[in-house]
Amino acid sequence: MTPQSPLAMPEVSQALCIFFILLLPLALAGLALINTGLSRLRSAAHSMMSTLCVVAVAAVAYFVVGFAWQGYPGLASHTLNIFGKEWNWLGAGRFFLRGVPLDGSRVSLAVLLQLFSVGLAALIPLGAAAERWRLRACCLSTALLAGITYPLFAHWVWGGGWLASLGANFGLGLGFLDAGGSSTVQAVGGLTALSMVWLLGPRRGKYNLEGMPAALPGHNTVYVLFGCVLSLVGWMGLNCAGSILFAGAPPGRIVQVAVNTLLSASGAVLAAAAITRYRFGKPDASLSANGWVCGLVASSAGCAFVPPAAALLIGLVAGALVTYTVAWMEARLGLDDPAGAISVHALGGIWGILAVGLFPRAALVATGAATPAVAPSGQMLAQVVGVATLVGFVLPLTYSLNWLIDRIFPQRIPPEEERHGADLYELGAGAYPEFQTHTDEFSQW
Amino acid sequence: MKITGLLMMPAGWFIVLAALVLLRATLARNIFVTAGLGVEILGLVLFTRAHLMAKGGNE
């Protein structure tokens, strides 16, 4: 790829980048609405309050230590020399963004983008652990995500780390490619969600004594579907800004990035709607929404590299994937994930990463590296190494950190309090005090 | 079983890293990276089964 100076940036790219980054809060709003809509009425206010706290904690933790450890290509970093190869494993910046010029340079724009995208990653576990995760515990967990897990992996991918250098060091295509964060944002958030679901266990009343899951539908489908629309705008910003900052895309290629993002989401929602129509007789709004977001998630890694037809295909597969895995995880693996976050973000992200490896020639052409010296054959292996790092390093790390928190501060709301909902237990008031009544689905307990 | 599963995941990752560092031949490297990923998935399956058994015990 074209070498980039940490500071220099054409003014057109700079202006575009700022515009795209400022769209990103809409992705946060979209995800918050989806999480809230898919949780029950008795925990709606808690869900939105958790969103605000989590985004705030993520921004502060990333400001304090996150960016120092993530860094950016060209900035100082810690490296190891193993068998003659340089392994760049951690940023060596200063805490509290000291020494980072906030002046519109590439580095400063990367900081701004990351402050939002780390919040997006931190919102993902909220959907999976909805209705039973204490506010204090989710803030602590977010601090560890934004301060340790996220910056570490993001450095390897976006900070000039060893995954990004797999091409230069080991001849694996162009190294690990992820323009918009299918791995760094989505899969890291999705695997954290999986850890939380394991640690917290299912909601009270979700499984009967035989282990069969009960349907606990979300309280507002309109929130969920409107959240999907907001997410599209936010994702456009994320993918376009990420492509400029982390894939070196010129302004002219942003059109392709936006087209790919929309096509992927469209393919995914159509696939999900068609499959649920076939399976259940009518399209399922909740699963179709999950499909839409999964299409966005899967689009992120390859949005700057693949042709539009490939983006549509990626979306179609993502939509089918999420439709089957949500039910499978709930029924067979005992994972109570109200927002489908594990399927959507972890599996969708991993599919997006691998999909880049399916179109290696397109990536070479898109980055201007299509020369005989660069073999496209290793691109899939580079992407597989990235997935192996997520499963073999990020998942055990995030599980262990959250297990530690759970030992010190129990993360789950006491089961007897779940009956009244997280709103009353944690906030002292419900989201809809004028008309709140609900049937008790816990009678079997 | 849970701890075994949890430890197998990084073990598989180290196999992947070792394959990158130590092997030059493309085929051997591909095989070992796939094997490492397989060990990780085995760890994930073990961990998930342990989680399911614990859940069954609680019920």
Image: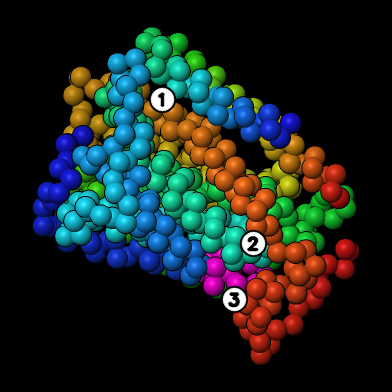
Identify the residue shown where x is 47% and y is 33%: A389
Vertical placement of A436 versus A87: above or below?
below
In the orientation shown, which residue stands out farthest toward the bottom? Answer: A434
Which label belongs to residue A99?
A: none
Label 2: which secondary element: loop
Which label belongs to residue A45?
A: 3
* Residue A152 position in % (x across, y down): 41, 42
Q: Label 1 is placed on what type of residue?
A: Leu
Residue under label 2: A133
The chain identifier of the residue carrying mark 3 reads: A
Q: Is residue A149 visible?
A: yes
Alpha carbon distance from label 3 to label 2: 13 Å
Q: Quadrant of the N terminus of chain A?
A: top left
Residue under label 1: A381
Mark 3 near mark 1, Cβ–Cβ under 8 Å? Answer: no
Magenta residues span A33-50
